[in-house]
Image (cartoon, rainbow, N blue to C red):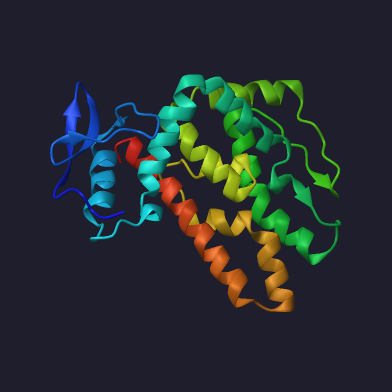
Amino acid sequence: MKRFWREARPVEHEGEWQVALDGRGVKTQAGQPQRVPSAALARAMAGEWAAQGEQVDPTAFVLRDLADYALDVVAPDRNNAARALLTYAETDTLCYRGDEGDALHARQIDVWEPLLARAEARWDVRFPRVSGVIATPLSAETRERMAAVLEACDPFALAALTMLASLSASLVVALAALEPDADAEALWAAANLEEDWQAELWGRDAEAEAARATRLEAFRQAMRFAALARGE
């Protein structure tokens, strides 16, 4: 597709913001006005449009696509989006450990325990640690509390969490990534601990490293989307 606009800029609509292309407001894929909660996010989304050349690269609209997901998919049924995210708590990668006493298990304790302990203290919950691959269900109390945490999130936070949890296979990591002082590199290293451990043992593969870098950039972009939606 060829570029069809000259100017992209954010415009305000009754406390919400929308990108306008030559004065015409952008719509979501479902056809509704693509209005977002902050000027910061709208400016960044306008930047995605402005950065396009004569030929439009559809893969370069990460923020736009996340906004569409928030408005078209999450907003109409926030509880369904929250329930879907809760499945990542049931099988959170940080809870599944190697055999006690081996070096991998020790690294998992060093890296994962602080993240889990912080989440447990913050929400007064308990995530069961598992040796092996057999899942241990969350207690009813923990499930209920985590459901409440997710249901309290707005559609834009839930959209970011969906991408973050999918990439990291961890609700704990995804929620930590929404914190204002979150360290993307450290959280991504935690989520990829076992993969990185194997690479250290057997050597790094260029194709695998490229894929890891691509996923990390997607993780960063989801974090950025959430921060911008909050006006940061």
Q: Could you say where residue 52 lies in the image, as x and y percent from the top left?
A: 26, 57
48 vs 123, nearest the viewer: 48
Please tell me whether residue 210 is drawn above or below residue 51 in the rendered image: below
Q: Quadrant of residue 99?
A: bottom right
Task: Give how far across and how far down residue 221 sits, in percent.
Answer: 42, 51
> Looking at the image, is 123 positioned above or below residue 95?
above
Residue most toward the bottom? 203
The image quarter containing residue 119 is: top right
Q: Is residue 183 visible?
A: no
Q: Nearer the viewer, residue 178 or 229?
A: 229
Q: Vertical placement of 105 versus 40: above or below? A: below
Marks counted in the figure total 0
In the picture as drawn, the residue positioned furthest to the front comes out as: 1
Question: Residue at 56% of width from left, 56% of height from top?
Answer: 188
Front-most of 164 and 76? 76
Residue 98 appears left or right of 108: right
Left or right of 114, for residue 78: left
Query: Which quadrant of the figure has residue 54?
Result: bottom left
Side of 67 where 186 appears, left or right: right
Taking the spot 62% from the left edge, 54% from the top edge, the residue there is 191
For the N terminus, which image quadrant? bottom left
Quadrant of the frame with the C terminus: top left
Residue 125 x/y as whole percent: 67, 29
Q: Residue at x 50, y 62 (%)?
A: 214
Q: Nearer the viewer, residue 73 or 193?
A: 73
Q: In the displayed structure, would residue 55 be above or below residue 74?
A: below
Residue 17 at x, y percent in the picture: 23, 31
The reply to whether residue 57 is visible in this rendering is yes
